[in-house]
Image: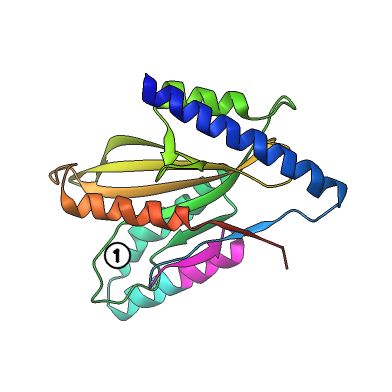
Amino acid sequence: MRRRMSSMRALGSWWMMTDKLDLRSMLNMEPEPDFVVDLPVGWSRREVSDATFLDFESSLKRNLMQAHQPQTYAVLGPGLRDSFEKMRNAGAFAFFAPIDAPANSPKMAASIIARYRRSEDGQPLDGVVRSLIRERGAQPLLDDPRTLRYEEAVEVRLGEGRFVNHSITYLTPVPRSRRLKALELVASLVRPAGLPKESERLRAQKDLLDLIVASVRWVRPN
């Protein structure tokens, strides 16, 4: 209880401080900022767009046809389209993934989607923050009160295998939004059900995702 109250006080004070800074920025009529993150080698940012989907689809088809696996493309092709539709339906505008990871790099079935969470009633998102802390056990990311973090896990079946999908959600206010809008980054990390959740491998992958999100910096739009 003491830890939860401490998190609420820290986050609450930061959101209030942000609001004061937003008011000054609004008076200057500055454009809404964009954000950047530091990515590991092989990771890249892509927009959730028709052009990105067509690029991925073309690359997938070319690689599998060269490997003489048209039957695999027949299975993965619709799955790729479904993944893009799910991102669109979730409100995602960009995603990050190890798309160009070197062949000799450690394999990591993970991605991060980016979307905005907006106030639905015209009130600041303070109530959302309090609810996430109370009901989801959310905590500041790496003890930094500017970003809220909580994690969920669900077992899924893919073909004949059983896996656990770890969903890690991060929430941080958008500058100059009067706390009416927040950037929400949702990381998805899949592990075999037989791999213990306390394994060093899984812990290292979660730490990597935390470090990526912790590097968020707001910049002026182009």
Q: Position of residue 62 (x, y in %)?
A: 40, 77
Q: Position of residue 130 (x, y in %)?
A: 53, 24
The answer, for residue 155, to whether it is visible in the render is yes
Quadrant of the rendered structure where residue 98 is?
bottom left
- The type of residue carrying mark 1 is Gln
Q: Point out the residue furthest to the top here.
A: 1
Locate residue 112 relative to residue 92 in the image: left or right: left
Residue at 53 percent of width and 64 percent of height? 46
Q: Which residues are magenta?
A: 42-58
Residue at 43 percent of width and 74 percent of height? 59
- In the image, residue 132 sits, relative to residue 34, either above or below, namely above
- In the image, residue 163 sits, relative to residue 4, either above or below, namely below
The answer, for residue 53, to whether it is visible in the render is no
Locate residue 28 relative to residue 7 in the image: left or right: right
Q: Position of residue 151 (x, y in %)?
A: 37, 37
- Circle 1 residue: 71
Circle 1 residues within 10 Å: few <14, some 14–19, many ≥20: few
In magenta stretch: residue 49: yes
In magenta stretch: residue 216: no
Secondary structure under tag 1 reads helix
